[in-house]
Image (spheres, grey):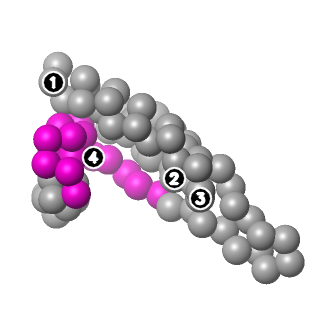
Amino acid sequence: MINLISAQIVLATLKTIRTGQLTVKLPDGTIREFGKNTEVTGTATVNREYLTVNHWSAFRHTLLRGDIGFAEAFMKG
């Protein structure tokens, strides 16, 4: 339960992304996109990143411990 609430809070925060695009694949297979495509005319530069979250607990770790929690969750897989 706490993991899903944490996910809702983190995903709501990701909605504030203004530059670039982040695509997140959630543990249930749902894909969420945040930000917008920033292709630059003539140079075809795209700031686009992809993240697959394998466990809902990663959101709890991120919410409670910030970048360190995110890094620890990332290392756990």
Marks 4 & 2, CB-CB < 8 Å contact: no
- The kind of residue tagged 1 is Ile
Q: CA distance from mark 1 to mark 3?
A: 29 Å
Write down the residue under mark 2: 22
Residue at left offset 19%, top offset 61%? 71
Q: CA distance from mark 1 to mark 4?
A: 16 Å
- The kind of residue tagged 2 is Leu
Query: Magenta part mainly helix, strand or loop?
Result: helix
Q: Where residue 69 appears, x then y in whole percent? A: 15, 53
Q: Nearer the viewer, mark 1 or mark 4?
A: 1
- First to last magenta residue range: 50-67
Report the disc number at residue 2.
1
Write down the residue under mark 3: 20
In this rendering, would 44 be left or right of 35?
Answer: right
Residue at left offset 14%, top offset 41%? 64
Where the N terminus falls, by quadrant? top left
Q: Residue furthest bottom?
A: 43
- The kind of residue tagged 4 is Asn
Q: Nearer the viewer, mark 1 or mark 3?
A: 3
Measured along the vertical axis of the image, is residue 29 above or below residue 48?
above
Q: Residue furthest right?
A: 42
Report the disc number at residue 54.
4
Marks 3 & 2, CB-CB < 8 Å contact: yes
Mark closer to the chain start, 4 or 2? 2
Give the SS element for disc 4. Answer: loop
Q: Where residue 31 appears, x then y in whole percent? A: 50, 39
